[in-house]
Image (cartoon, rainbow, N blue to C red):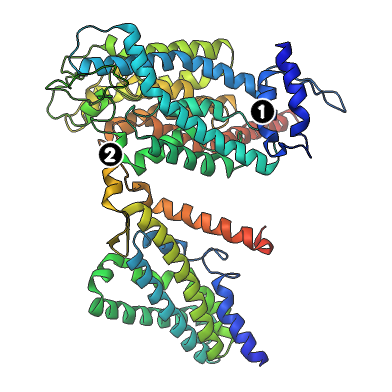
Amino acid sequence: MKSLRKYLDRIKPQFEPGGRLHAFQSVFDGFETFLFTPTTTSRSGVSIHDSLDSKRVMIIVVLALVPCLLFGMYNVGYQHWLSIGETQFPFWQLMAYGFLALLPRLLVSYIVGLGIEFVVAQWRKEEIQEGFLVSGILIPLICPIEIPLWMLAVATAFSVIFVKEIFGGTGYNIFNVALVTRAVLFFGYPSKMSGDSVFVSTGSICGLGEGAVVDGFSGATPLGQIASNTGDTLTLTNVIGEPLSLWDMFVGLIPGSVGETSTLCILIGAAILLATGIASWRIMLSVFAGGFVMAAIAHACPSASYPASMLTPLQQLTLGGFAFAAVYMATDPVTASRTNPGKYIYGFLIGVIAVLIRTYNNGYPEGAMLAVLLMNAFAPLIDYTVVQSNIRRRLRRLKTKV
Amino acid sequence: MASNNKNLITLLNPLSKDNPVIVQILGICSCLAVTAKLEPAFVMGISVIAVLAFSNVIISLLRNTIPTNIRIIVQLVVVAGLVVIVNQLLMAYQYDVSKQLSVFIGLIVTNCILMGRLEAFAMGNKPWPSFLDGIGNGVGYALILVIVAFVRELLGSGTIWGFQVIPDSWYEHGYANNGLMILPPMALIVVGCIIWIHRSYNKELQE
């Protein structure tokens, strides 16, 4: 630790104005504060520094994402092994396969996103903002495993520039960066973001998982199957046609975007976020409540033309990206409502709209992304209304007293 | 000489410094609607140039006889008449394009650029400068339309003026057209980028 500090101190003058590597000052500064707590203190006035700065917050969110990430890797391998007709599932081979499949996506998203952040930070002569630390890991987790890398790069660049940097960088974006990346992919390249050939990795990687795909294979996600379902009954199957139970959906051994299949791992992440006080329990709770209420209403009057209304509320909450959106997306402190009553309204409406889109618009099998983005746009309005009604109530109280 | 110079400014200013779309932010609506392909955007641009130039001239000729109370109605009648003529001409000679543009030729009547120029310029100037002003603003509008349509058609359909320019081998290697470019919101973002670039070169326009 000490030698690292010494090394940093030695190379520091090169990054100061006038030094050889001045152009990389923001990069150096970013790494230094990432490794060591800044020792600089306020020069004037009284101020208290919380040790929980945004770097620590981001690290905790990344930690909370690790269960989803690991399970996502395992599931990528598992779905592949299923699709080539294996009955043995060697754990480490599955993990290695998933790791190798996911690694390029993680790298692309980080290199593109952080590259743009570094350039912009240096250009504006600011410190590097750490916001992309979380977005970079979220982006591969909410995309199908088979998404082409160049599309991921294009969408990440678009999203970082037009959603974040234009509005002033981390903390000023009105929409969730990771979700906009997904939305750009979804509307820009719909054939690579939905359908039944993108959610299961079918090729072999570095000699792992060799084998041809079995007959009767279908890579459709449960929600994809629902959207194309006809008739009065609904049977959900896995990639080789075996029926799925609610337990499978909860544990997450189903095809889907990498990180969002396992409600179990998402709940572990939610526990970490709530225990450390990073995410708002009000938002999480109300998203699930909203989704449950809407799903119950839809389930009360099922109809064959809207097959998703045949799902039970619990199935609705465990399938697709709903839980992931509720825990990691809706609670993003930058884009969510800030006032406490506002958080209940914001979360509840996300849940309702997500299930509403999913059920009553067969063109969009999954509505969680659109619901969160829509409510991102409304969050400032909700806050404004809450604050104004508070002011009016206090004014009334004042008048009755006088 | 001085008058010539002034006329030149009237003609050239709307191309960049006083562009109706990217500086005055007028006519955005049709800019979103007709720019998915280059050809309709170009035809739309020509139509607006023609309508704008001639309505400017007609209003400028009538400017001393129009009662102030009903000037908007008179302006609308003139513009509407010209729009109908343009629409009929398009139907006669460019039927396919006119079908693509559908209602948007008719909606030139409500284009803010037209009423803006008639009110701001033609009502107070002689016919010749008014004609130049109409041409200038029309070209300024058409210019932006063509740039936006070029970007959108290239990235969204891989074609320019209907001819494929992205080679087939790219598609075989996994390139895909960006479906978002076909959707109207992308026109707004492209216009935003043009404004961004334009203002970074013209610092006096920055607010």
Mark 2, Cα crowd under 10 Å, few <14 / some 14-19 / many 20+, is some
Q: Is the residue A38 above or below the residue A120 in the image?
A: above
Instruction: List the single residue furthest toward the right.
Output: A44
> Disc 2 is attached to a residue of which chain?
A
Q: Earlier in the sequence, mark 2 or mark 1?
A: 1
Work out which quarter of the rendered image holds the N terminus of chain A and state it: top right
Q: Is the residue A138 above or below the residue A276 in the image?
A: below
Which residue is identified by label 2? A191
Task: Identify the disc placed on residue A95.
Answer: none
Provide the secondary structure element on which disc 1 rests: helix
**Residue at point 55% right, 78% down?**
B119
- Say which quarter of the image contains residue B6: bottom right
Residue mark closest to the camera, 2 vs 1:
1
Query: Distance from label 2 to label 1 (Cα)?
Result: 38 Å
How many labels, in total?
2
Image location of residue A42, percent across then percent down: 83, 26
Q: Is the residue A401 above or below the residue B27 in the image?
A: above
Image location of residue A83, percent across then percent down: 21, 19
Which residue is identified by label 1? A30
Q: Is residue A6 left or right of residue A83?
A: right
Task: Depth check: give the residue in front, A291 or A401.
Answer: A291
Under mark 2, the amino acid is: Ser
Image location of residue B60, percent across then percent down: 52, 88
Looking at the picture, do discs 2 and 1 lie on one chain? yes
- Say which quarter of the image contains residue A193: top left
> Disc 1 is attached to a residue of which chain?
A
